[in-house]
Amino acid sequence: MAKPRLTPLIESLPAMVPFVGPEALVRARGKPFRARIGANENVFGPSPRAIAAMAEAAAGNWMYADPESFELREALAQFHGVDRANIVVGEGIDGLLGLTVKLTIDPGDTVVTSNGTYPTFNFHVAAAGGRLVRVPYRDDRQDLGALLDAAIAEDARLLYVCNPDNPMGSFWQADKLQELIAALPDGLLLCLDEAYCDTATAMQPLAFDVGNSQVIRMRTFSKAYGLAGARIGYAVGEAGLIAQFEKVRNHYGINRVGQIGALAALGDQAYLADVVGRIDRARGMLGDIALRNGLQPLPSGANFVAMDCGHDGAYARRVLDGLLARDVFARMPGTAGLDRCIRVSCGTDADLDVFAAALPQAIADADAE
């Protein structure tokens, strides 16, 4: 049978989804979850201002979004104290990560990342034919020194750091990131994925230095702002670097309703502060639930808590399966060493009550096998 000619690179790659979505699990199970606390979504939802703005905008969906995202970029620039030329808006951080790889990586070029951190980044590198060097975690944190050493030794073009980190929730303070940035060799771009920075109440924020063309920082409206379904992310960097995105980005790929909702959400910082407070409270409650059941919660700056089950990955998988059997959607890291943990997103009091009731039963099941 006749068929199209795909590139050898694409032909060689497996077809897979980085994360099995809760919707797929619901279809397979034939029933909904009682607690959806596995996808690091903000269950507290977006600002009422954002909801109202998006509802009003829905009737105008016959129009394309502004391809320049002018108003949103202008507002973000004022918010961060930079120029509009320092910001590009994209289809979530995932879309911007793909564009960053496209801008920097030719087949065979080296990219350095941590072994176990946000895996969707690795898909972009694979699709570009990049050579991925994975650096082990140290004490459940990304090892900044080892990452830098690997990038230098391998003559890497791109270094990816997720801060706060997914899936462990750990984070580095601004002074350590400054040390990393100061030591970057010529020709290396540091991509800082800061999807969870808004929820990291104990993290000292890193000041923006848009004069440094070797650093690009990714932010999103998917987490603290509660707009995961809108797919609006943005990158902040040196103007010359940001201008390169105009050569490769999908100019009409932005969701117009999401674009308008993000602008309204950014303008409601009082609501954001309230939500971050609720996330912080839920983190504490998740930690208490873990401790009551003999699990060790890891310090987290994200909107989830990783819980050390005290055994190997097979045991943690049994605990996770026990939760799923009791209609609780949670996840776990997929890398050996980290997979001794389960990872539970912050939820409402009702969500956490369901989790608190299901966890001891899931642990009992895991112990019995």
Image: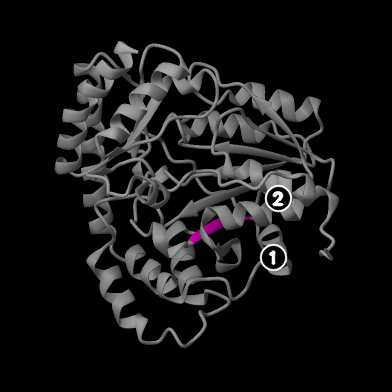
Percent position (x, y) of residue 101?
71, 50
Q: Residue at x 84, y 41 (%)?
A: 108
Looking at the image, tell me whether mark 2 or mark 1 is earlier in sequence order: 2
Q: Is residue 167 magenta?
A: no
Q: Residue at x 36, y 38 (%)?
A: 200
Number of numbered discs overlaid on the protein picture: 2
- Within the image, what quadrant is residue 263 found in? bottom left
Percent position (x, y) of residue 313?
46, 19
Number of other residues with Cα within 10 Å of mark 1, as a class: few under 14, some 14 to 19, many 20 or more: some
Magenta stretch, main secondary structure, is strand
State the extent of the magenta-drawn residues as a range. 233-237
Quadrant position of the C terminus in the picture: top left
**Is 11 placed left or right of 47 in the picture?**
right
- Within the image, what quadrant is residue 366 found in? top left
| Residue type at numbered disc 1 | Ala
Task: Quickly name the residue at label 2.
Answer: 101
Task: Quickly name the residue at label 1.
Answer: 243
Q: Nearer the viewer, residue 179 or 280?
A: 280
Number of other residues with Cα within 10 Å of mark 2, as a class: few under 14, some 14 to 19, many 20 or more: many
Percent position (x, y) of residue 239?
66, 61
Q: Nearer the viewer, residue 261 or 32?
A: 32
Percent position (x, y) of residue 180?
62, 31
- Dot in front, 2 or 1: 2
**Is 106 placed left or right of 222 in the picture?**
right
Q: Is residue 236 magenta?
A: yes
Q: Residue at x 51, y 58 (%)?
A: 92
**Is 149 placed left or right of 174 in the picture?**
right
User: Disc 2 to disc 1, how far (Cα)?
Assistant: 15 Å
| Residue type at numbered disc 2 | Val
